[in-house]
Amino acid sequence: MIQTIYGPMEEKHLAKGKKTGSFENDNETTTWVEYWIEGVLVHRSVDIKLKKGIDIASALQGFK
């Protein structure tokens, strides 16, 4: 089931991948897929994978 703007729907009722894509830079890889019904975008799924972790010690220095 895919949660859409019209509520949950089975994937077989949606036009999957009318627009899919990806983006990559030094910090992340992002992919997405959109689900459509009769030319209306009803759901977009996005997956972001970070390539680098954060230095937790540096991040916490501002929280004194």
Image (cartoon, rainbow, N blue to C red):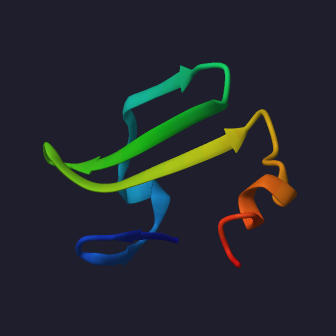
In the picture shown, does residue 60 fall above or below 44?
below
The picture places residue 33, in percent across and down from the top left corner, at 46, 40
The picture places residue 34, in percent across and down from the top left corner, at 37, 44
Q: Quadrant of residue 27?
A: top right
Residue at horizontal 55%, vertical 34%?
A: 31
Q: Nearer the viewer, residue 4 or 52?
A: 52
Q: Nearer the viewer, residue 2 or 62?
A: 62
Residue at horizontal 61%, vertical 44%?
A: 48
Q: Is residue 53 left or right of residue 8?
A: right
In the picture shown, does residue 30 fall above or below 12?
above
In the picture, the quarter occupied by the C terminus is bottom right
Q: Residue furthest left?
A: 39
How many tags in the picture? Answer: 0
Q: Nearer the viewer, residue 20 or 38?
A: 20
Q: Is residue 8 left or right of residue 5?
A: right
Residue at horizontal 52%, vertical 25%?
A: 22
Residue at horizontal 46%, vertical 55%?
A: 12
The picture places residue 37, in percent across and down from the top left corner, at 22, 52
The picture places residue 19, in percent across and down from the top left corner, at 35, 30
Q: Is residue 17 left or right of residue 54?
A: left
In the picture shown, does residue 1 fall above or below 12?
below
